[in-house]
Amino acid sequence: MSRRSLIGRDQSVSAFSAILFRFCDATGVLAAALTDGEGETVDYAGALDPFDIKIAAAESAVLLHAVREAGALDWDVSREIIIRGAVRSLALYTLSDGYALMALLPRGAFGVSGRALQEVLRDLGEEAGLSSEHPVLRASERWIHVDVSTALGDCRRPESVWLQGGWCPLDILGRYIAGPHSRDLGYRVRLTNGAELTLVRERLGVWFADELPLGA
């Protein structure tokens, strides 16, 4: 949780804000907020002014309501809405009971990491007892944002992963192209305790692991 992200908060840090902070760190979004069915901000995270985040969240809730009431092109069952803007872009992801995740993106952006989105929707759902029908949650892998130490002179080659408060050295078993982006690199690695897991470095330099092994 970055120091900058805590500056100017107008409410206490909660489990929700911790989840949203991780989402911001993993994606580079400007701000993120969880809104309820009335358009009120439950909690938020990001580097923008809290007032601006909450105004954007309220306006996005109005937009989402209008889309659901439109009754055209099956928009009432939309799971994701992305608006690409010249100043900022906006992404909305629906949850059950009228809740939604709002993300303010840099201008021209048109989406976020699917792995980061899976993690934040899953964690918000588990914390609040909510559900989502977004396709990223149907993936067989359970992605988690992790910190990785890389080789000197090669930021794409992992040497250790941060687990349970310390760096855990690893051996690389194999490497592959992970997903549709040629700059997403996947590694199958073995930890010092013998456990194996998959690490993926996305094109923005953020690392994800699949379900962490028990005891790791």
Image (cartoon, rainbow, N blue to C red):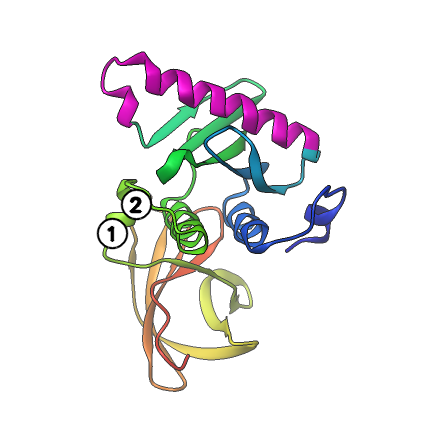
- Total count of labels: 2
The residue carrying mark 2 is 136
Instruction: Please rate how many residues cluster around mark 1, counting C-alpha atoms within 10 Å: few if below 14, some from 14 to 19, many from 20.
Output: few
Q: Which residues are magenta?
A: 51-77
* 214 or 168: nearer the viewer: 214
Q: Is residue 143 left or right of residue 34?
A: left
Q: Quadrant of residue 74?
A: top left
Q: Is residue 4 left or right of residue 166?
A: right
Q: Please, what is the three-letter code of the amino acid marked with disc 2?
A: Val
Secondary structure mostly seen in magenta is: helix
Where 51 falls versus 2 (above or below)?
A: above
Q: Please, what is the three-letter code of the amino acid marked with disc 1?
A: Ala
**Do the numbered discs 2 and 1 sit on residues whose CB atoms are within 8 Å?**
yes
Q: Would you say residue 74 sits in the magenta stretch? A: yes
Image coordinates for residue 12, horizontal then vertical, percent: 69, 50
Image coordinates for residue 140, horizontal then vertical, percent: 23, 57
